Image (spheres, rainbow, N blue to C red):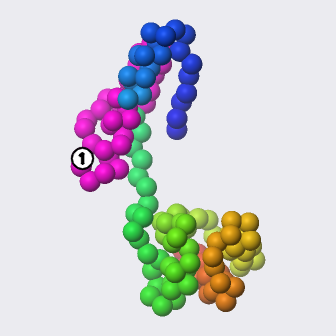
Amino acid sequence: MVLLARPLSRRAAVAGACLLSLVGAAVRPSLAAEPAPSAPSIVSGAGVTLHSLNVEFPDPGRMFPGDSKADAINNNCLACHSAGMVLTQPALSRAEWQSEVEKMRSTYKAPVEESDVPAIVDYLVALKDRK
């Protein structure tokens, strides 16, 4: 969640920028390999209060499980989506997954061969049936 506010004065704007820099410095290193410095959970100043958040993102290097059954989805979908993002989607019907894959191809111009679509849809339907 990002909260934006307009300061009442130039002095408040400078104080607000410093607070945002402090919070940004605490967040950015946590995305890198180095540990994040300890930061307060709440920072206030110049009429603005910022709350620290701990956010975990899906592992971008993760592949879809399933060996050869996952080849079509691994070869086509990981160019734009992390496996974690797809794996956390709600269960959809076969028709809904088919529509989603076709939307990726037609609206977003995903370079997915038409011959790979059935395997991708089968994989997504089977994946969500197991849960």
Residue sitting at x 50%, y 79%: 74
Q: Which residue is pictured at 74% across the width and 66% down the height?
A: 107
Q: Is residue 88 positioned above or below 27 on the image?
A: below
Identify the residue under disc 1.
35
Kindly identify the residue that appears in the image at 43 percent across and 16 percent down: 14
Is residue 36 inside the magenta stretch? yes
Residue 87 visible in the displayed image: no
Q: What residue type is labelled 1?
A: Pro
Res. 37 in view:
yes
Does residue 25 show up magenta in the picture?
yes
Q: What element carries label 1?
A: loop
Magenta residues span 22-51
Rendered location of residue 63, percent (x, y): 43, 75
Viewed as shown, does residue 87 lie left or right of 106?
Answer: left
Give the left or right position of residue 21, taking residue 128 as reference: left
Residues 80 and 48: in front is: 80
Spot occupied by residue 94 in the image (x, y as percentages of width and height)? 71, 79
Image location of residue 32, percent across then percent down: 31, 51
Q: Considering depth in this image, is 95 or 129 the residue closer to the camera? A: 95
Q: Residue at x 44, y 9 (%)?
A: 11
